[in-house]
Amino acid sequence: MAVVSGAAVLVRTAAWEALGGLAEEFFLYYDDVDFALRLQIAGCRVVFQPAAIVEHDYDFDKGDLKWFYLERNRAWSIATVPSTRTLLLLAPLLAASEIGLLARAIREGWWRQKLRAWRSVLSNFAAIEQRRRVVQATRTNSDRDWAQLMKPPRERNALRQQFRTSTNQRSGCSKRIITEGFDLQPRNFSLNVVR
């Protein structure tokens, strides 16, 4: 599994400390995704526990700032996690995705936040470049290994059904969030891990 929601998370202390935890630059949104991706390239596993249930009362509509942070932080993560070669290979797809997202932003009325996110990324290029060096220094997995994690899990349909059953049994706006655990794989990783 490549990433999971950070609404409830367990992380081995050694992995948290080695990668510096959640990105302070992000403040809100996408920090959990970015951290999971960084764990993956550093040779750690991201695992979820479908039997765990966490009630998370969450309202998706958080206003304009949510779109700014989501878009800005997604761009920072995309700019820092993949290798340069992978970024170059994905450039046409990433550009097309950005155009599609801008069209959606215009249609849904959050285009100003999308443009503000782009301006923020461009004005912070030096900081992104520095963060990229730090993130890439932790890499032990190739992008080929990392890309394998982007495939949909075989058990997706079973999880979807389990999610529907669980949420149908609850009332209100609570949602069932699957708790995830991060398991450190010490191969090629300069940490002493006590198990």
Image (cartoon, grey):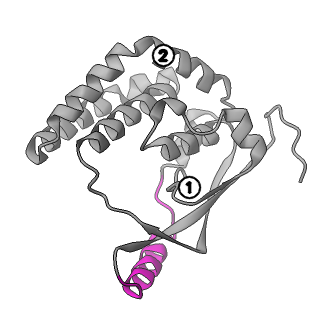
The crowding category of the residue bearing disc 2, from other C-alpha atoms within 10 Å (few below 14, some 14 to 19, many at least 20), is: few
Position in image of residue 43 (x %, y %): 69, 40
Residue 93 left/right relative to 190: left
The crowding category of the residue bearing disc 1, from other C-alpha atoms within 10 Å (few below 14, some 14 to 19, many at least 20), is: some
Main secondary structure of the magenta stretch: helix
14, above or below 83, in the image: below
Magenta segment boundaries in residue numbering:
151-171
Q: Which residue is mark 1?
A: 1
Position in image of residue 166 (x %, y %): 45, 82
Residue 16 left/right relative to 125: right
168, above or below 1, in the image: below
User: Looking at the image, which residue sits at the far bottom?
Assistant: 169
Q: Quarter of the image holding residue 93? A: top left
Q: Secondary structure at mark 1?
A: loop
Q: Secondary structure at mark 2?
A: helix
Q: Quarter of the image holding residue 186? A: top right
Residue 8 left/right relative to 57: right
Residue 6 left/right relative to 184: left
How many marks can you see? Answer: 2
Q: Which residue is mark 2?
A: 127
Question: Which residue appears at 67% of the width and 36% of the height?
Answer: 42
Q: Amino acid at mark 2?
A: Ala
